[in-house]
Amino acid sequence: MSKTLKTLGKSTIDRRALLRGGLAAGATLAGTGAAQAAGKAAAAADPESLPPNVPDWSRYLGAGVADAPYGVPSEHEAHVIRRNVEWLTATTESSINFTPIHELDGFVTPNGLCFERHHGGVAEIAPGDHRLMIHGLVERPLIFTMEDLMRFPQESRFFFLECAANGGMEWRGAQLNGCQFTHGMVHCVQYSGVSLKTLFNEAGLKPKAGWILPEGADAAGLTRSIPIEKALDDCMLAYSMNGERLRPEQGYPLRLVVPGWEGNMWVKWIRRIEVGDMPWHTREETSKYPALMADGRARQFTWVMEAKSVITSPSPEKPMNHKGPNLIKGLAWSGRGSIKRVDVSVDGGRNWQSAELQGPVLPKCLTRFTLPWSWDGDARLLQSRAIDDTGYVQPTMEALQQVRGTNSIYHNNSIQTWLINASGGVENVRLA
Ligand code: MTE
Ligand code: CO
């Protein structure tokens, strides 16, 4: 086989091989494997296809319009996928995978890359069979079909969702060597749906209504207590994300959106909302999500995801390949509002300079920051620190541990340190 063919993707190869006259050649080439070809593509560029020559792929017709009725990414991007850590959980049904944040640009997460967290697997629900019930302290208990919900006034808003356990493995020391694994339990999409306020206007809240209890239709039947003030402020029931219907793993056909608050409260496959006058103290909010403090007591109801940031490149998955001009890229977010500023340090937190924020900078959303940086080839300690519009500054782990001790798992929003070695490799480290 020719060198040129080896560097091409599989579907292209099949078609080209046929053009060049030989099914046999096509069969052999197809066996080289797309991933292998993708990996070699950059290094093995064929001089015959480089400028000033006309590249090979300009000499034949490409795929027609019906080739992929629902588009998929280029096969050369096959490494950009959600990943899980097998030893973290006993089964995949009650588990987590991680968004490949180190591979993304901007602030929107593509639907197929949004991390998943299920306690009982993905519920399989046909929208025609789904109902949402609102009952309890309301004037008119109601049951809605999906079609009913879609006839209400619609809103479309961007929000990040972060699992309270994001970074949970890192409390006592640097553990997972990859920014996908240390920070990837976060995604940010545009949700379309109906606000809870609109639905509660329809049902009529009784004067004593103080809390709501959303419940999922999955095998876990997840339930959480949410104060009515938050429900009426900015919570919504979403049926779409990034313009298309929710993915099954994100709660199809209906999920609760609780902007800025811990992911666990964003009940997926939502089937029921009870209105009451007190919190229910469910399993999730008593035995699972409270934060265990140093003195053995626990903090309950830790809802807000505080300001946080991470440098996504360079990172363990994105080593430094070039001395001289480079671009530091990262993400920042705050459950209390907008990101005001992100500082970056290349000397382990001694000196800081402000990064550029890529607009739009939206409240309770991921915010992309960048900073041009010239690397001299020496070992460096990279950090980022987010500041939100309440003035809150992302803390060091030392500062967090002074308040919360070392028993915690959830709500780790501490400053991350990446060590860049002189060789350009990047490692997750903890500064003493
Ligand atoms: N809702 C139901 N019904 N069942 C679940 O297991 N997991 C929760 C929450 N909502 C869960 C759920 C947790 S812990 C998180 S972090 C988010 O959903 C994850 O949402 P995602 O899978 O869309 O990323
Ligand atoms: Co979670």
Image (spheres, rainbow, N blue to C red):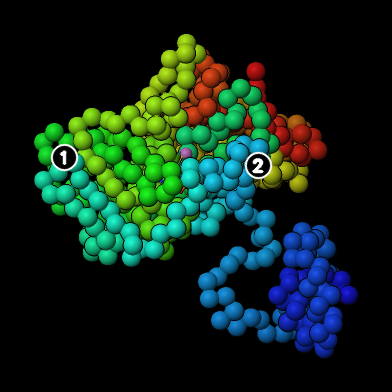
Would you place residue 170 above or below residue 38 in this image? above
Between 131 and 70, the one lying in front of the other is: 131
Q: Residue at x 53, y 57 (%)?
A: 112
The amino acid marked with disc number 1 is Leu
Q: Is residue 360 visible?
A: no
Q: Residue at x 82, y 74 (%)?
A: 29
Q: Earlier in the sequence, mark 2 or mark 1?
A: 2
Residue identifier under label 2: 86
Q: Tell me the tag on residue 5.
A: none
In the orientation shown, which residue stands out farthest toward the top? 295
| Image location (x, y in percent) of residue 125 | 40, 59
Would you place residue 396 above or below residue 44 in this image? above
Q: Is residue 10 visible?
A: yes
Between 224 and 66, the one lying in front of the other is: 224
Q: Residues within 10 Å of mark 1 (few under 14, many from 20)?
A: many
Does residue 257 appear left or right of residue 66 in this picture?
left
The yes-or-no answer for disc 2 within 8 Å of ligand 1 is: no
Does residue 409 appear left or right of residue 264 in this picture?
right
Q: Residues within 10 Å of mark 2 (few under 14, many from 20)?
A: few
Q: Secondary structure at mark 2?
A: helix
Does residue 379 appear left or right of residue 2 in this picture?
left
**Quarter of image, ligand 1:** top left
